[in-house]
Image (cartoon, rainbow, N blue to C red):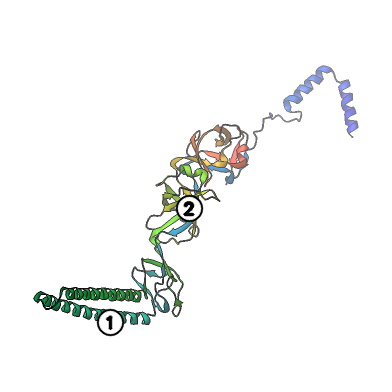
Amino acid sequence: MILSTKRSVHMWRRSTPMGLLVLVLGACLTAGCNGEPDEIEAASPAPIQIGAESVARATREEIRTGPLVSGQLVAERNATVRAEAGGSVVQTTLEAGQPVRKGTVLARIDARDLADNVSSSEVAVRSAENALELARSELRRTEALVAGGALAQRDLEGARNTVANAESQLAAAKARTSTAQAQLGNTVVRAPIGGVISAKTVNTGDVVTPGTALYTIIDPTSMRLEASVPSEQIGSVRVGLPVQFTVRGYQAQSFTGRVERISPSADPVTRQVPIWISIPKGNEGLIAGLYAEGRVETELRQAIVVPGNAIDATTGTPAVTRVRDGRAERVEVKTGIRDGDTERVEITAGLADGDMVLVGAARGVTPGTPVAVGR
C-alpha cells in the first residue's frame, strides 16, 4: 500500500507542471495541508504544579539567635535533714510530696536515756549551787574573824579558794545540763526550711545514728537551671542575658530565665562551660531533676524571615525563587541572623512581607516558568 502511494505521487509530480506544483504547495502551507482553514497558534506551556509543602511566605516576625544550652532543673534552696541524736525513731509525721513549714516536727527519736541525763545534771546543778552558797557564807564569816584578829590571813585565802572551786563546779554542772538538754532537743527533728518533702528515708522503728539522712526538703520557689554552653560559643554569653528554654514534660510551655553566673572553667572532658540560670517566681510547678534545653538570646529582633531551605547560596550571592503573577523568578537577597533552632533566616533586603517563595528542591524551578501552587 505504501509503495503504491509513493508511486502515485511520483507519477503525479512527473505529470504536473512546475507552476501548478508550486501553487499547490503554497496552498498546503497556508491551509495546513489538511483542508482546514484554521490558523496554527503557538500553544502556551502548562504551569508546573507545586505542592503547598514546597511553598512558604516571607513574614515579619520575631527571630532570635544565640548559643544552645542544656541541663537540669535544681532547687537552689534545699536541705537534707539528718539525725543529730542516735536511737530508735518513735514517730514520723510527714511523707514525700507533702508541703512543710520551717520548724515543723518531722520525726521524734527515743529520748528516755537523754531525759535521765538531763535530770541527773539538773540535780548536780542544784548541789553545786548549795555548795557555792555554803562557801560564800564561810567566806563572809572568815572575813569578819580576820578583821577582828581571830584568824590569820591565810585562813581568808583558803575560804576564797573554796568559793572559787564551788563556782567552777557550778559552771561545769550547768554546762553538762545545757549539753544534756541540747541532746534531748535533738531527738525532736524539725524542718530547717519551708518547702516540699522530696524524699523520706526513715520510718517509725528504724534505729538511727547521728548523721543518718532522714528527709530531703526542697523549696520549689527557688528553682534554677544548671546548664552548659559549648566552649566555642561562651564568648557571646554574659550575665543578665535572657534565656528561653523548654522542660521535658512541659513541651507545650516555654520558660524564661536569666544568666546568673558563669563558671570560670570548662569541663575537662566535654569542654562545656557550666552556667547557672535563675528562674523568676511564678514557676513553682517545675520539678527538680527534669532535663531542660533552650538558648541564650544574644540577639532578638523583628524582621522579615523565611525558612532556611528557601535560600540558595550556591552561586555565592544568596537568592530565592519567588512566585509572582503565576511565574517563578529568581531574586537576590541579603540575609541577617539565622535561628538555628527553628531554621529560619532573616532577610534584610530583597523580599517584602507576604512574598511567596519556593523551598527545598522546588526552588530549582527555572525563572520565568509558569507555576501553579496546590493546596
Residue 227 disc label: 2
Q: In x, y percent, where is residue 189? A: 37, 73
Residue situated in front as seen by the camera: 257 or 250:
257
Whole-percent x, y for residue 65 in the image: 48, 43
Q: Which of the 4 image quarters holds residue 40?
A: top right
| Image location (x, y in percent) of residue 126 | 24, 80
Q: Is residue 217 left or right of residue 350?
A: left
Secondary structure beneath label 1: helix
Q: Nearer the viewer, residue 206 or 321?
A: 206
Helix, strand or loop at label 2? It is strand
Q: CA distance from mark 1 to mark 2?
A: 59 Å
Q: Residue 24: x, y in percent?
A: 79, 22
| Image vertical order of residue 316 relative to residue 14, above or below | below
**Marking on residue 123:** 1
Q: Is residue 210 above or below residue 47?
A: below
The quadrant the N terminus occupies is top right
Q: Residues within 10 Å of mark 1 (few under 14, many from 20)?
A: some
First reached walking from the N terminus: tag 1 or tag 2: 1
Q: Amino acid at mark 2?
A: Ala
Please name the residue shown 21% across and 78% down the image: 132
**Image check: 372 left or right of 222?**
right
- Residue sitting at x 44%, y 52%: 276
Q: Residue at coordinates 41% horizontally, 52% vertically from top-left?
A: 257
In percent of the image, x 56 and y 43: which residue is there? 55
